[in-house]
C-alpha cells in the first residue's frame, strides 16, 4: 500500500519539531484549528493512550489518524533499526482480499522513502502529477492526495504516518497537517509508554522463565526419558509383532517430545529481553494470513529460532513466508498449510507446505517467488519448490551465523 509513487511535490510542511508532551502546541501557535478540530484531536489522543500493547497502540494510531483528518486510506510505517527502510506497515482502509492481491508490503521507496530521509511533513495534492511518479503495483487502490508526517520517540524518528484521499474529495489542508503532526507527538508518547510497559513485563517474566526451564529439564524430561527406557526394555518381552510395532512408535514419539521440550528450554534461557521475537513474528504473520486462507496454518519450530535469527534475517524470512502464504491464499485452493522454521547445523530452514492443487504446468513464477530466490542467493542459500497432486512444498534455506551448536 502507498508503494507505487515517487516523491516530493509543491507542498511541503515546514513545521518545527514539537517537544514530547505538547500535543496541542502546534495548533495553538498556528491558531487555525477550531473547537471541533481540537475536540477530535483530544479524542484521538485519548484513544491511542488507552492501549498498553505496542501492536495495539500502533493499530490505534493508524486508525485515529485516518479518522482525524477524514482520510479514506491510512498507514503507519515502522522504521527498521538502521532507519533506512520500513520493517512493519499497518494499514487502514484496505481489506484482506486486496492485501493478499497486492502481495509484499512496501519497504519505503518513492515518496515513502522521501519521508524516511527528510523527516518532515509532506503534503501533495496529487501523487500522480509528480514527474518521478511510477504508478501503483497491480491490484493497488488508486490514490491521489497525500499527507505524511513522522512520529518521533525520544527525539528519534520511530516511523511515519501516511494518509491518502480525504473522504470528501478535497486535498489535505494546512489544518489537516497540523492535526496530524500534533497527533504524531501524542503517538510518540503512547509508543514510548507501550515499549516501557513491555520491557517491565519482560523483566518480570525472567525469573518465571528460568524456573520453568529448570522444572522442564529436571523433572519432565527425566520422567519421559525413564518411560522411554522402560518401554524399550518391554518390547523384547512381547511376542506379538503388532504390539511391538506400536510400542516402537510410542518410543519414537517420546524421543520427539523430548527434543521439542529441549528446544523450548533453550528458548527460555536465551530469549532476548528487548528486541523482536522471530517466533512471535512468524505466529502473528500466520494468524494474519488465516483471514485470507480461511483457516489457521499449522506452525512448528525446531532449534534456537529466537536465539539465532534476528535483525535483517528475521525480516527476510518473514518476507518470504508472507509471499508464500499470499500465493497459497490466491492460487492453491488449499485446506491446510504447515509452516515450519528450523535452526540446525548453522542453517535456517523455512518450509511451507500446502495440500492445494499444485503449480500448473508451464506456470511462470511471479515477482514474489523471484524475490524469494534473490533473497536466498544474497544470503548464500537456496530456494526450491516442488509440487504434485497432493500440494506444493517450498523450502527456503540460508546460513544462520547466529546459530548455536
Image (cartoon, rainbow, N blue to C red):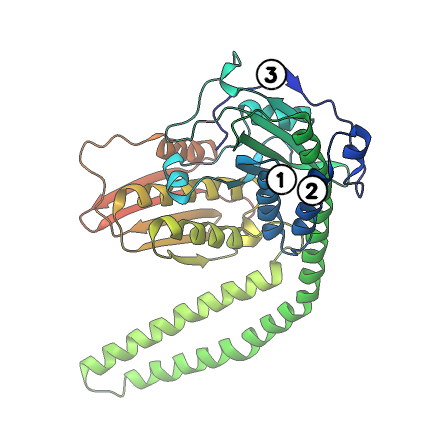
| Residue 394: quarter of image | top left
Residue 284: % across, % down: 49, 53
Label for residue 68? 1
Q: Residue at x 43, y 27 (%)?
A: 142
- In terms of depth relative to the viewer, which is nearer, 303 or 128? 128
- In terms of depth relative to the viewer, which is nearer, 123 or 111? 123
| Residue 151: quarter of image | top right
Residue 66: % across, % down: 58, 39
- In terms of depth relative to the viewer, which is nearer, 133 or 172? 172
Question: Which comes sooner in the sequence, label 3 or label 2?
Answer: 3
Label for residue 9? 3
Distance, label 1 to label 3, CA atoms, is 23 Å
Q: Is residue 39 visible?
A: yes
Residue wearing tag 2: 41
Q: Are marks 1 and 3 in contact (CB under 8 Å)?
A: no
Q: Is residue 264 above or below residue 103?
A: below
Residue 314: % across, % down: 52, 44
Question: Which comes sooner in the sequence, label 2 or label 1?
Answer: 2
How crowded is the residue under tag 3: few (<14 C-alpha within 10 Å), some, or many (20+)?
some
Q: Are marks 2 and 1 in contact (CB under 8 Å)?
A: yes
Distance, label 3 to label 2, CA atoms, is 27 Å
Q: Is residue 168 above or below residue 261?
A: above
Left or right: residue 288 versus residue 268 is left
Question: Which comes sooner in the sequence, label 1 or label 3?
Answer: 3
Q: Is residue 405 visible?
A: no
Q: Residue at x 32, y 86 (%)?
A: 234
- In terms of depth relative to the viewer, which is nearer, 277 or 308? 277
Distance, label 2 to label 1, CA atoms, is 7 Å
Amino acid at each position: 500500500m502507498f508503494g507505487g509513487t515517487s516523491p516530493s511535490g509543491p507542498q511541503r510542511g515546514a513545521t518545527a519539531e514539537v517537544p514530547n508532551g505538547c500535543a496541542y502546541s502546534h495548533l495553538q501557535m498556528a491558531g487555525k484549528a477550531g473547537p471541533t478540530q481540537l475536540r477530535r484531536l483530544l479524542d484521538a489522543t485519548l484513544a491511542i493512550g488507552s492501549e498498553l500493547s505496542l501492536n495495539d497502540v500502533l493499530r490505534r494510531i493508524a486508525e485515529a489518524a485516518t479518522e482525524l483528518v477524514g482520510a479514506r486510506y491510512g498507514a503507519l510505517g515502522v522504521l527498521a533499526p538502521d532507519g533506512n527502510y520500513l520493517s512493519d506497515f499497518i494499514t487502514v482502509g484496505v481489506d484482506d482480499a486486496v492485501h493478499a492481491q497486492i502481495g509484499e508490503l512496501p519497504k519505503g521507496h518513492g515518496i515513502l522513502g522521501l519521508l524516511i530521509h527528510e523527516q518532515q511533513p509532506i503534503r501533495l495534492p496529487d501523487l500522480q502529477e509528480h514527474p518521478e511518479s511510477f504508478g501503483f503495483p497491480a491490484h493497488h487502490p488508486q490514490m491521489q492526495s497525500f499527507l505524511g508526517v513522522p512520529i518521533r520517540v525520544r527525539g528519534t524518528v520511530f516511523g511515519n504516518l501516511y494518509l491518502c484521499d480525504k473522504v470528501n474529495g478535497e486535498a489535505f489542508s494546512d489544518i489537516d497537517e497540523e492535526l496530524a503532526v500534533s497527533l504524531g507527538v501524542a503517538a510518540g508518547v503512547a509508543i514510548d509508554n507501550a515499549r516501557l510497559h513491555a520491557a517491565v513485563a519482560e523483566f518480570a517474566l525472567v525469573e518465571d522463565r528460568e524456573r520453568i526451564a529448570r522444572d522442564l529439564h529436571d523433572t519432565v524430561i527425566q520422567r519421559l526419558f525413564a518411560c522411554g527406557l522402560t518401554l524399550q526394555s518391554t518390547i523384547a518381552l512381547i511376542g506379538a509383532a503388532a504390539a511391538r510395532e506400536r510400542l516402537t512408535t510410542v518410543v519414537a514419539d517420546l524421543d520427539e517430545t523430548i527434543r521439542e521440550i529441549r528446544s523450548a528450554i533453550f528458548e527460555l534461557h536465551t530469549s532476548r529481553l528487548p528486541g523482536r521475537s522471530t517466533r512471535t513474528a512468524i505466529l502473528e504473520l500466520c494468524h494474519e494470513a488465516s483471514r485470507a486462507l480461511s483457516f489457521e496454518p499449522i506452525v512448528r519450530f525446531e532449534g534456537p529460532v529466537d536465539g539465532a535469527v534476528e535483525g535483517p534475517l528475521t525480516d527476510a524470512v518473514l518476507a518470504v513466508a508472507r509471499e508464500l502464504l499470499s500465493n497459497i491464499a490466491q492460487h492453491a485452493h488449499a485446506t491446510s498449510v504447515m509452516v515450519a522454521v528450523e535452526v540446525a547445523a548453522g542453517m535456517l530452514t523455512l518450509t511451507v507446505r500446502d495440500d492445494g492443487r499444485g503449480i500448473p504446468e508451464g506456470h511462470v513464477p511471479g515477482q514474489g517467488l523471484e524475490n524469494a530466490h534473490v533473497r536466498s542467493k544474497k544470503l548464500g542459500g537456496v530456494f526450491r519448490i516442488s509440487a504434485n497432486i497432493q500440494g506444493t512444498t517450498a523450502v527456503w534455506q540460508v546460513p544462520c551465523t547466529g546459530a548455536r551448536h
